[in-house]
Image: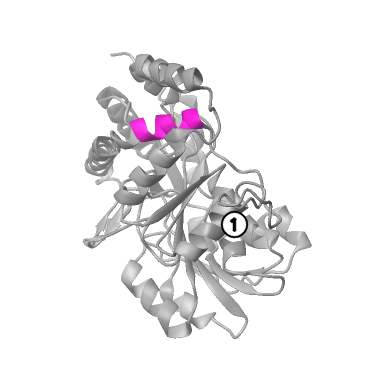
Amino acid sequence: MEITKVPFFGKDRYFDTYSNDLMRLMKKVYSHGKVVMGPEIEEFENKLANYCSRKYAIAVGSCTDALYFSLLGIGIKEGDEVLVTSFSFIASASCILRTRAVPVFIDINPETYMMDLNDLEKKITNKTKAILAVDIFGDALDINALEEIGEKYNLPIIEDAAQSIGSRFGNRKVGSLGLCSCISFDPTKILSAQSNGGIVLTDDYSFYEKINQMRYHGKNLKTGEFETLGFNSRLASLQAAILSYNLDKLESWIEIHRNIANKYKKGLSDIPQITLPKENQETRHVYHKFVIKAENRDELKQWLSENNIQVMIHYDKALHENKLFENYDFRAEGLNEVNKIKTQVLSLPIHPFLKDDEINFVIQKIKEFYNNFE
């Protein structure tokens, strides 16, 4: 098989594979006409809550909204401090800025890329009001250790599980940590919609009611009254139908991701200039992203691009280094590991529709690069 291009994402292949079923779902939703907040929403919410071992779920327009609403739901206000990793997608911190609270950035464990819990505990002050705990790249934080810290300091935990649905730490599923968990259905995720989407999961009924009211202009769904200042952040019925359909395939897709990860690990294990992702024995990593640390990362990226292999960098700067933060208060001290890792990380293609020949081609070209690099 001649390789012309190795795509980073596989959405076109997904559609080619399942187009008949997707058209059937579209016809079903558009036939009943309730294209926003139709019966598919509650069906999917119940289904995902059950999958993540939660009591309640509230589907919203994006995971960014899910995080922001969760901060509002616990009463975060201007001047409060919220602890968050310094190595994540911008939404993990911009949601804090939107409340006028102060992000306090935590350094990361160099093996997992997730927050260093020792650094986390050191940065707790009397102004700290919440922990926003990010599961990254398909891995899972130490749920038990985090909950112990939360209980010790009486701090609510919001789990940013945008990237890691299906992952587990021990017998605990991602999506079950803390007061609430937020998941993304962005088209790049393993469990994805064909548009933006997100969800808040919780076991607290009063918190559930707050978020449920918040997503539709502050409307009390029992009385019909608009009681508080809310938002318009509803998931389309078609996207919920697609998500329910995809949820049935999630476990098989996770196994494909894990198999691809193992092939990369085996094929790249003898390259000393590369550090491969490590999987904690207590964790099921779902490899939403397959992220290596590479010497001469930028040159390798350019080489792979020249050979029509799409790769990406997640992430090339600490969150506070984005221009956005020039206008806000934040704390960002002692981020030694982030400052190293941001120059080394490179994400290789991984999705359920990646072919073995493409995986082998990626491995071959990485080996060629380091064999020839001077």
- Identify residue type, mark 1: Phe
Residue for badge 1: 69
User: Vertical placement of 57 versus 78: above or below?
Assistant: above
Residue farthest toward the front in the current orientation of the protein? 223
Q: Which residues are magenta?
A: 237-245
Q: Quadrant of residue 115?
A: bottom left
User: Vertical placement of 353 versus 136: above or below?
Assistant: above
Label 1 secondary element = helix
From the top left corner, tell me how far across and down residue 277 is, in percent. Answer: 33, 52
Q: Is residue 75 visible?
A: yes
Q: Quadrant of residue 26?
A: top left
> Residue drawn at (30%, 30%), measured in percent from left and top?
359
Q: What secondary structure is the magenta-colored segment mainly?
A: helix
Tell whether 217 sits left or right of 163. right
Residues 207 and 299: in front is 207
From the top left corner, tell me how far across and down residue 122 is, in percent. Answer: 50, 82
